[in-house]
Image (cartoon, coloured by chain):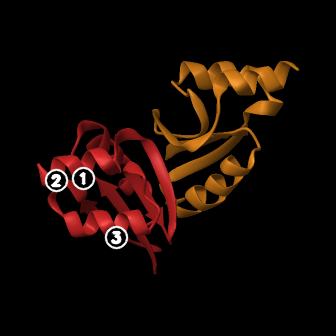
Chain colours: A red, B orange
Amino acid sequence: MKKAIFYHAGCAVCVEAEQQVLDALDCNRYEVESVHLAQNSLAIEQAQLAGVRSVPALLLDGTVFHINFGASLDEVKGACHA
Amino acid sequence: MKKAIFYHAGCAVCVEAEQQVLDALDCNRYEVESVHLAQNSLAIEQAQLAGVRSVPALLLDGTVFHINFGASLDEVKGACHA
């Protein structure tokens, strides 16, 4: 199984993209995980290391795809530490 | 079957996204089509009507997802009419 990780921050742009994009993936070949960054500051670091710069973002088998634009990772960090 | 249309302009950002994103979709539920806008000025108008502002973009069952950023549609138009 390949791995698909959807990083989001709970915003409207993220939630809409999450539902439709994850639903379209082939769950027979992809193990799908959804990570809410604004609730998890450790996950923000992991996302950064994976190359995520903004949310929503989809990591497909290690490659980052930035989908639309909800917020930069810096904005998410600010919200997380506030 | 739902419809997935991937709009691209043949650039490196587009081609990389196209291969990996289309491969991850569930082809049992989505009929997948790939449209090369820089070779098709009529398709540019259709893409604009669908809400596409930049390429690469994925239209999933009528909803547009802008994936990463290769070029704006205006830039693609310029290349098309050059």
Kindly indicate whether the residue at mark 3 contacts the one at mark 1 (C-beta within 8 angstroms): no
Residue wearing tag 3: A46
Q: Residue A32 at x, y = what percent?
A: 35, 68
Type of the residue with mark 3: Gln
Residue A33 can be seen, yes or no:
no
Q: Is residue A62 left or right of residue A33?
A: right
Dot 1 crowding, Cα within 10 Å, few <14, some 14–19, many 20+ = some
Residue B52 position (above or below residue B4) = above
Report which quarter residue A38 is drawn in: bottom left
| Location of mark 2 (residue) | A80
Residue nearer the viewer, A19 or B26: A19
Which SS class for mark 3? helix
Marked residue nearer the N-terminal end (1 or 3): 3
- Are the residues under marks 2 and 1 on the same chain? yes
Distance of label 1 from label 3 (alpha carbons): 13 Å
From the image, tell me which residue sits under label 1: A77
Residue at position x 16%, y 53% in the image? A80
> Badge 3 local density, few (<14 within 10 Å), some, or many (20+)?
few
A20 relative position to B30: left or right: left
> Could you tell me how far apart the alpha carbons at marks 3 and 2 are, in whole angstroms?
15 Å
Please give the chain letter of the residue carrying mark 2: A
Residue A45 falls left or right of residue B49: left
Task: Give the farthest residue toward the left.
Answer: A82
